[in-house]
Image (cartoon, rainbow, N blue to C red):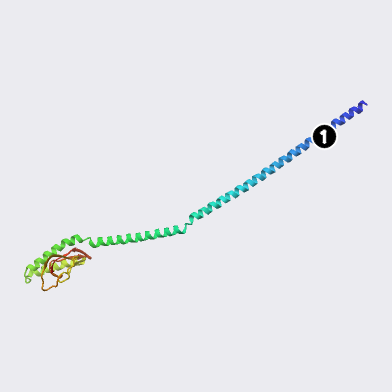
Amino acid sequence: MDKEIKKDIANEEIKEETENECSGSDKEECSCGADNNEETNTNCGAESNDKSGSEKAENVENEEAESDAEIDEPAPEEQECESERYMRLMADFQNYKRRSEKERSDIYSFANEKIVSELLAVADNFERALASVDKNESFVKGMEMIFNQLIGVMTKAGVEEIKALGEDFDPNFHNAVMAEESSEYESGKVTEVLQKGYILNGKVIRPSMVKVAN
């Protein structure tokens, strides 16, 4: 009887140990399954987060591209303003160019105005000397040649004599110093030239000093 009791006790202990081992293996399997599920969920969440982040980045890039396109393409009103501003600048530049060319031309044309004005006094003295001497004298022809040469040089420089005798009085070209009655000329006509006037390249450098008929 003692042997049977001992045998039964041993069998029960073995059975209990077997049950304990089975229960422990089940727990490990459950924990492994839970770990696998957590990893799967974590991976899925990371993938979904990556997808949403990339979509947001794409949306931001698209919005930036649209805003850049709106900035690069000015409105029609702005384009008209730019066109008008460009046309005004072009007109101002053309006016400046014309003024510069005119100023340059004036410099070339009137650079010798001072020396020509001084030569006019020499020409006046020549004329007075020729008018006061006898034309038959031999030296008079030489003086006339020199005088004509002087007038030719001034003519090449752009000097012209102002026509006055018998012309209508023009205050732009004539300086009236005296008025007189005249049977030869009509009223307002120049009756006598007291001093010749000259023009240099279209500019009056000395008006004619004249008498005018009443």
The part of the image, by quadrant, that contains residue 25 is: top right
* Secondary structure found at label 1: helix
Q: Identify the residue under disc 1.
A: 19
Residue 177 at x, y percent in the picture: 13, 64
Relative to the observer, which residue lies in front, 106 or 135? Answer: 106
Specify the farthest residue to the top: 2
| Circle 1 Cα neighbour tier, 10 Å, few/some/many (<14 / 14–19 / ≥20) | few
Q: Residue sitting at 66 percent across and 44 percent down?
A: 45
Residue 24 at x, y percent in the picture: 78, 35
Residue 159 at x, y percent in the picture: 20, 66
The part of the image, by quadrant, that contains residue 136 is: bottom left
The three-letter amino acid code for the residue at tag 1 is: Glu
Specify the farthest residue to the bottom: 184
Q: Residue sitting at 59 percent across and 49 percent down?
A: 56
Q: Residue sitting at 71 percent across and 42 percent down?
A: 37
Specify the farthest residue to the right: 1
Compared with 81, 51 (above or below) is: above
Q: Residue sitting at 79 percent across and 35 percent down?
A: 23
Q: Quadrant of the N terminus?
A: top right
The part of the image, by quadrant, that contains residue 16 is: top right
Asked if residue 15 lies left or right of residue 87, the reply is right
